[in-house]
Each structure stands twice: as structure tokens, then as C-alpha cells.
Amino acid sequence: MKTKWWKTVSIGLASLTTVLVILLIYGRAAGGEKLFYWILSISVLPFGLIHFTVWLRTRNKIYMLVFSYYLFLGLTFLPVIRSEALHVIFALIAVSLMIPFIMVTMVKKKINWRYREVLELAAKPVSGKADGFTARPFPAGKMETDRAGILKFSRFLFSEMIAYPVFEPDRTVLVIPKNMWVWVLFLKSDYKSSTHITVDNSGHISVKIARDDYSAYRDELTFDLLCGSMGDLFIRWFGLFRENKTGEIIGELNRI
């Protein structure tokens, strides 16, 4: 079936880039080379800190690579480092990390948030247009597993930025957020207004798709069918995870 194209395009990265360029131009014009490099360093180093935090939480080695690249790139231009030798060393390390950084971020999409891809994959098999949005959770099948299996699967989804797991005594909630960083950095914890999949300790699944996410599809879709398709998607992914075929999950997401 035809994939439903997403209405909205994230402007966060474009806005951030625009602001940074304006600051760099202003810094160069108003404060000269030194202020320019201060702005450049200070804008890069926080990205390194964020990715280091993600590594601490997910233990995905990819984020340590990204952290290292941002760290040495920021240190390369940091004016307070006066030693020419240190600048050269930091620059060489940053350059050596550049190709792996480009590969994992742009080519292999290893650190992408998977919000758009997940919702488009869920919509792909849905062709009906009857019945609009409802706020209730939708029962969507069962994973044949126990809590231990659910926890392992949830940690895999988190490490690949597919879903953010919230662990509760009787169930696990897999949140599909628009902005993963606010969850990773503990800036948000209430999942009720976000699209999420709930898996109880016996494997029974329910799906709740947020109103904003449903509205973002170009076509109105049969809501129950969309929720059922989302449940089927995660059940199928769990089967692939259990068979150690996680590469197929990532490949499917990358093709969207």
C-alpha cells in the first residue's frame, strides 16, 4: 500500500543552524576572530555533552563516537587553548573522526530519531478512511514473551532511538516522541499526550496515537486500523529482535 506522506517538516534544526550562522557572522563583525571562535566552540561543545548523556543512558557506542567528534571539534577552536601544538592535535583527531561521524549520522542514520519513520510504517498498510480520531487506547494484539523479554526489547528500541521506554510495575510504555532529547535529558516524563504503545507483563499490547500525530497525516486514516497496524509493527519487530535480526528493523526504518 502507498505510504502516507507526512505533512509537517521539522524546522528545529534549520532554525538552530540559522541562529548559529547569524551569531557567527555577528561575532566575526563585532568582535573579530577571537569572538568568532568563542561562539563556534561554545555552540559545538554542548552537542558533545548531550550525546555523552545519551551514551550514558543507552550505552550505544555510536553516541560515544559522536560525543568525541563534537568534543575535539570544539576544543580545536577554543581560544583559551593557547598551545599551537594542542590545536593541531585536537584538529587531527577531529578530522580523523569526521568520516565515521558522517557515516553514522548521515549515511547510516544511526542516531536519527525514528518518530516520523515509525508513524509512516504504521500507516503504510492502512487504506481505509472511515472513522476519525478517538482518544481511547486500542487493544492491538500480544507479544509472546514475558517481562524479561519485553525489557530487553525496550532497551534495544531506546538504544536505536525508536522508542523511549517508561518502566512501570505491571507494564512497559514505549513512547514515540516528536523530540527524543526532552525525554533523554529528563525534561519530560508524562507520556499521556504522546503516541505510545503499552505492553503489560503478559505481552498484551494497547496503542494510543496522539491527536497531533494523527492530524499530521496528509490523508485521514481509519483510526482503529492505524492503531492495529502500529501494534502489528511492534509485534513483528519483536519477532525479528528475538531472532537477532535487528539489522532488518533498522534497514526498514532507513528505507522510509
Image: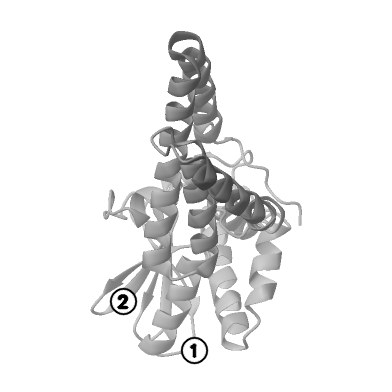
* Callout 1: SS: loop
x then y, percent, for residue 213 = 48, 45
Q: For this rendering, which residue is in front, 85 or 45? A: 85
Residue behind mark 1: 144
Q: How many marks?
A: 2
Q: Is residue 142 left or right of residue 2?
A: left
Whether 248 is drawn above or below 78: the answer is below
Q: Residue 52, located in which quarter of the rendered image?
A: bottom left
- Residue contact at pointers 1 and 2, CB within 8 angstroms: no
Q: Amino acid at mark 2?
A: Arg
Task: Answer whether residue 138 is visible to the viewer in this image.
Answer: no
User: How far apart in space, not on screen, are marks 1 and 2 (Cα)?
Assistant: 14 Å
Q: Amino acid at mark 1?
A: Glu
x then y, percent, for residue 249 = 64, 71
- Dot 1 crowding, Cα within 10 Å, few <14, some 14–19, many 20+: few
Q: Residue at the location (51% across, 49% down)?
A: 72
